[in-house]
Amino acid sequence: MLRRVAAAASIALAALCGGQAHADEILVGAHMPLTGSLARSGQAFDEGMRVAIQMFNARPETKHKIRLQVIDDESTPAKAVSAVEKLVSDGAVAVIGGYGSNIIGPASDASNRLNTTYVTAGAVSDELTARGLKTFFRINNNAGYQRGMGTLLETLKPASVSILASTKEAPALLAKGLQKDLAGKGIKVTLHEFDPAITDFKPIINKVKLQDKSEILVMSAYENDYVGIIRAAKVLKPPVKLIVGAWSLATPKMYTEFPDLMNNIVGTSFLPFPVEMKDEEGKRFAEAYKKTYNKEVEYLSTLSFVETTILAEAIARAAEAGTLKSRGLPDAMRKTERETLLGPVQFDATGDNPRFTVAMGQHQGGRIVLVSPESAATGKIVYPGLPW
Amino acid sequence: MIDLVLQALFSGILVGSVYALVALGLALSFGAMRIINLAHGELVLLAAYCAYLVESRTGLDPYAAIPLALAVVAVVAAALFLMIDRIREHRELNSLILTFGIGIILTNAILLIFASDVRTTSSPRLQDATSIGPVYAMNGELVAFALSLVLMVALWWWLKKSWYGRAVRAVSSNRAAATLMGISPVRTELAAFLVAGALASFAGVALYAMSVVQPALGHALTVKAFIVTVLAGVGSIPGVFLAAILLGVTEALTVTLASSALQELVGMVLFLLVLFLLPNGLFGARARRG
């Protein structure tokens, strides 16, 4: 009997104390889609975030260690909102957002209602910053991706471009922005939107082949769509000279998994492969990441590493100034101005990072060569260049 | 324009045959036992990951994974049936909830074991293109089409001609009367569930060999299979094949003549229209009248 009471008391004590940060630690919460349809992205984000906290806590100048509490939002908005509420009630001073504009939207609303700073690198919808939330910060945005892809396409000067875009919010937004941008530069653009449930891209690729006859095929979508599109293109062989995609395409993983489909494909990228970090922080990140996960740095992990590092530094500044508990964290975030692995990060009044821009990387025989913009290029683009 | 429509029709038939392949197992458990197995898509997915495992570890053709897929899915299907068999009240509704929950468990188990990356075959033989006149297909799609036809005929034969098939129909028609005739309903339903699992195994391997799989796909497969089953009408195996082809062709033509953004919508409109005009499905009513 006594044993049972003691066990119950221990469990109750653990439950009461489990969520609380230790006295010398600052709790940061995160909701990530570790399961569900966005699990692939969520797990990569989770890895970058953990390495960032590990590196921040290991800095000699760090006075306040950060403890991370992650809740799986199961790729659903409702679970993300509950996760934010739980994290804040557990004492989190800030919340790192997961992935997907439809999830980040309500989750950051909840965080704002609870006066808690919310940082994300996983949502590019313009509507998020248009809300004018004082506690919302984002390091990447649609404009940056559009700029990166637009710069490359402008350099190649194609007469016509076909854009294949998922109807999901972020890819659709990017595609429409690109369409407007390229059309304004006198390039003939045809947009083909597709349902995310599509399994066979041949009817669309056949339209590109027989009707559009475009020089460049642009994909604004996700990994499974890229594979389906390129595979359909390999079957039908439309007369395009290059295939360009958005996020999560120019990654070593994609080449390892689909070597027959990826050669010469171009996608947004921050780093070449083999990874060549120019600065000390990047080198340490790549080393710590490799040591922890036994693999090379991933695209999404880099995004979450940067957002987490910036948040941790702002927390340290606010804690040092004694304003962390009096809602000084948003002000500390707004004072951020630093070079990162993603380029310069600075927040405007809406919490957006107007200086965000991506480079474009091309798969070249197992390597990823940065080919655009010229300032970031590590090699020349293979153009025309196709996987077949 | 003719080339576009021809390719759309051809692609639609091939995609439809895969829908049929996925739906056959669900149609069997729904038609024979009135159990809507909401974990059916996850069983298909499990088989697809068996194919990935065999191909990535041994370098063999994905179709070499069929024995492994059959064994793994049979164990899971049997366990699933034994759990369903323990339901004593409101079997149709409770089995729905139970299988939905098991589907979630299976999805997350797959996620845990295989991670969330997208997987597909690397076999050049299956990925290579074949042209038939002006239309093109991947070899993997043609194999899936042939497999779908063969399995449809095999299932139809099993239900019509074999002792167990007739027993399944008898239990489905009148459980009490079938018991009085010396048929064990539990054993018969287990056999039907195992056959449904075998069909899911073939479907999963074929899916991996021609498309892209990832852990979150199971639910979408179940939904598609359910639409096809209801569209066909309960109890009609050739109907499942034809309804699946109709759905595939409708979707492909929508993509070609309008936009892919509308394909799911048009598919659902077709589904609702058929249910409105023929509440027993396209082939269910005729079968009943006959």
Image (spheres, coloured by chain):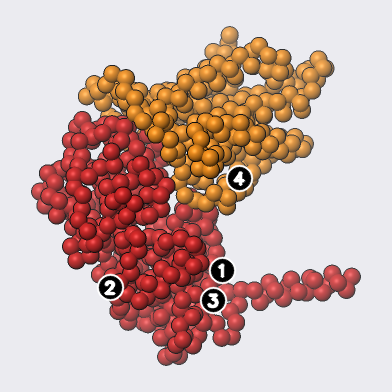
Chain colours: A red, B orange
Of labels 1 and 4, the one closer to you: 4
Within 10 angstroms of label 3, few (less than 14), some, or many (20 or more) residues? many
Quadrant of the snapshot with the C terminus of chain A: top left
Q: Which residue is drawn at 64% across and 74% down?
A: A18
Question: Please, which chain is the residue tagged with disc 4 on?
Answer: B
* Same chain for the residues under marks 2 and 1 in the image: yes
Secondary structure of the residue carrying tag 1 is helix
Quadrant of the snapshot with the N terminus of chain A: bottom right
Question: Please, which chain is the residue tagged with disc 1 on?
Answer: A
Residue at the top extreme, as displayed: B290
Q: In this orientation, which residue lies closer to the viewer: A243 or B106? A: A243
- From the image, tell me which residue sits under label 1: A86
Question: Please, which chain is the residue tagged with disc 2 on?
Answer: A
Of pointers 1 and 3, the one earlier in the residue sequence: 3
- Residue B98 lies, in percent from the top left, at 67, 42
Give the numbered dot on residue A67: 3
Left or right, residue B135 beside residue A100: left
Q: Quadrant of residue A136?
A: bottom left
Secondary structure of the residue carrying tag 3 is strand
Left or right, residue B21 beside residue B130: right
Q: In this orientation, which residue lies closer to the viewer: A107 or A6? A: A6
- From the image, tell me which residue sits under label 4: B106
| Whole-number angstrom distance, CA of label 3 to CA of label 2 | 26 Å
Of pointers 2 and 1, the one earlier in the residue sequence: 1
Q: Which residue is drawn at 19% across and 66% down?
A: A375
Give the numbered dot on residue A344: 2
Residue at the bottom extreme, as displayed: A321
Q: Which amino acid does label 4 sit on?
A: Leu
